[in-house]
Image (cartoon, rainbow, N blue to C red):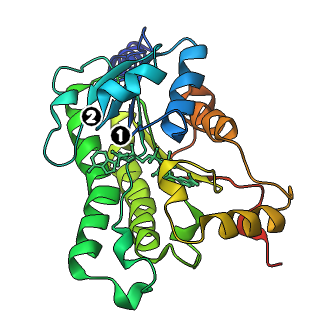
Amino acid sequence: MAVSRALETLFELRKPQPKTRKVLVAGVSSKRSLGLAIGEHMHQSGWETVLTTRRPERLALVAPHHEVRHLDYPDDMSAIDDLSDLTGMVFCLAKTDIADKDSGLLGVSEENFLKTISTSCYSFIALVREVQRRNPNLRSVVALTFLGGERVVPGYEVLGVAKAALEHSVRALASELGHENVRVNGVSAGAVPTTSSRVLPDFRRVHEALSRQSFLRRGVTAEEVAGATAYLLSEQSGGTTGEILQVNGGLRHTVL
Ligand SMILES: NC(=O)c1ccc[n+]([C@@H]2O[C@H](COP(=O)([O-])OP(=O)(O)OC[C@H]3O[C@@H](n4cnc5c(N)ncnc54)[C@H](OP(=O)(O)O)[C@@H]3O)[C@@H](O)[C@H]2O)c1
C-alpha cells in the first residue's frame, strides 16, 4: 500500500498540472494569418498568448490582445529566451521562393529546396527543442500543415516535400517527448485565403477545386482551423499525440 502510494506521488510529481495556460503562436503576419485566428481563439478561451512575427509593429496594430515578439528564423530566436511558463506552442512558419513556381519539383533549385525545408520544417524541430528546454509545463505542441504534404497538389511541390517532412517530425517528436508528458500533433488545414497562400500559383483555382470536391462542398474557415488547434492544445485531447487532425471538409477521403 505504502509502495503504491509512493509510486502515485512520484507519478504526480512527474506530471505537475500547470496553473496558467499560456501559448506561443510562432509565425503570424497579418489579420488574415491562421496564427492570428488561433491567437484570438485562445485569448477568448482565457489563455495568455504570445505571437511571433517578422514585423512586430505592423502586427501589433491588428493584434491588440496579444503580446507580440520578433522572431526571424534562423537569425533571431531571442523571442523565446525568457519564456518559461508556456503550456502550449503552435507552429505556423512556412516559406518557399515562388520564383520556382512554374517549374515543378524537377525545376526546384537546391538552394530553394534546402531553404524551404529549413524554414518550414527544421525550424519546427529547433523551436520545439528550445521551447521544451525552457518550459517545464509545456504540454501540447501543434504544427499547421496541408494535404499537399500527402497528396500531389499542383504548385505546392517543394512545400509538399517540406510538409511531408514536418508531418513525420510531428510523429517523431511525439515519440521522443511523450515520456515528458508533452503531446505533439498537427492540424492539416484546408485552403484558406491568407497572405502567403494567395501568392502560391493558381491558389484561387486550387481553392475553388478543393472546396467543390470536399464532402462539405465548401472551404473551411480560419476559425474552424483555430477551433481544432484549440482542441489539440487543451486537455480535452489529452490522450491524443502523434496525429494529424484533418480540417478540410473530408478532402483526404475524396476521389471526385
Ligand atoms: N492558408 C492556407 O490555405 C493554409 C492551409 C494549410 C496549412 N497552412 C499553413 O498554416 C501556416 C500559416 O500560414 P498562413 O496561411 O496563415 O500564412 P502566413 O500568415 O503567411 O503565415 C506564415 C508565417 O511564416 C512566417 N515565416 C516565414 N519564414 C519565416 C522565417 N524565416 N522566420 C520567421 N517567420 C517566418 C511568415 O512571415 P512573413 O510574412 O514575414 O514571411 C508568416 O508569418 C503555414 O504553415 C501554412 O503552410 C496554410
Which quarter of the figure has residue 230?
Answer: top right
Q: Secondary structure at mark 2?
A: helix
Q: Which mark is residue 179?
A: 1
Q: Residues within 10 Å of mark 1 (few under 14, many from 20)?
A: few
Vertical side of 31 occupied by 119: above or below: below
Which residue is labeled 2 in the image?
132
Asked if 168 appears above or below 53 in the picture, the reply is below
Could you say where residue 75 lies in the image, as x and y percent from the top left? 13, 45
Q: Is residue 147 visible?
A: yes
Horizontally, residue 183 falls left or right of residue 97, namely right
Residue 91 screen position, x and y as percent: 40, 43
For badge 1, the amino acid type reads His
Q: CA distance from mark 2 to mark 1?
A: 13 Å
Q: Quadrant of residue 9?
A: top left
Is residue 242 among the parts visible in the rendering? no
Other residues around mark 2 within 10 Å, as few (<14) / some (14–19) / many (≥20)? many
Image vertical order of residue 106 relative to residue 165, above or below = below
Q: Which mark is residue 16?
A: none
Q: How far from the left and from the top, in percent, is residue 147?
A: 59, 65
Residue drawn at the location 66% of the way across and 69% of the way down: 206
Q: Looking at mark 2, is its residue's CB closer than 8 Å to ligand 1?
A: no
Name which of mark 2 and mark 1 comes first in the sequence: 2
Check disc 1 and report its element: helix, strand or loop. helix
Residue 65 position, x and y percent, is 47, 13
Asked if the residue at label 1 sits under 8 Å from ligand 1, the reply is: no
Q: Residue furthest top?
A: 19
Q: Amino acid at mark 2?
A: Gln
Q: In this orientation, which residue lies closer to the viewer: 169 or 64?
A: 64
